Image (spheres, grey):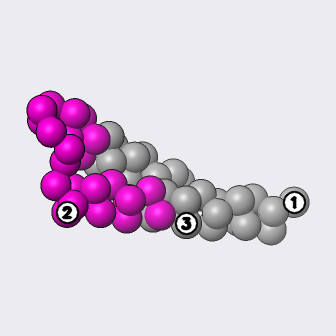
């Protein structure tokens, strides 16, 4: 589970970096940046779901 937690930390950090970068612009972020944020959110949700499945298996 340590590998999964490490992956989650990296995904969340990258998403935060992209969001912070987007916040510095005076206009809406470009579509590519919004897409990247959304894709990272999907990857985070998937990793969390796998973590929950693994936790349920250990019970």
Relative to 56, say whether 13 is above or below: above
Tell me if label 2 and label 1 are in contact, CB under 8 Å: no
Quick one: 16 or 34, which is closer to the camera? 34
**Quick one: quadrant of the N terminus?**
bottom right
**How far across and how far down the image is residue 47, in percent?**
54, 63
Per the image, the residue denoted by label 2 is 32
Q: Nearer the viewer, mark 1 or mark 3?
A: 3
Q: Main secondary structure of the magenta part?
A: helix
Instruction: Check the image and name the residue furthest to the front.
Output: 27
The magenta span reads 17-42
- Disc 3 is placed on an element classified as helix
In front: mark 2 or mark 1? 2
Tell which of 47 and 18 is nearer to you.
Answer: 18
Q: Which residue is mark 1?
A: 59
Residue under circle 3?
46
Q: CA distance from mark 2 to mark 3?
A: 21 Å
Q: Is residue 30 above or below residue 42?
A: above
Q: Residue at x 55, y 66 (%)?
A: 46
């Amino acid at each position: 589970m340590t590998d999964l937690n490490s992956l989650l930390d990296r995904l969340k950090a990258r998403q935060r970096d992209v969001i912070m970068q987007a916040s510095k612009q005076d206009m809406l972020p470009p579509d590519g940046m919004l897409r990247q944020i959304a894709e990272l959110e999907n990857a985070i949700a998937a990793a969390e779901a796998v973590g929950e499945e693994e936790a349920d298996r250990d019970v």
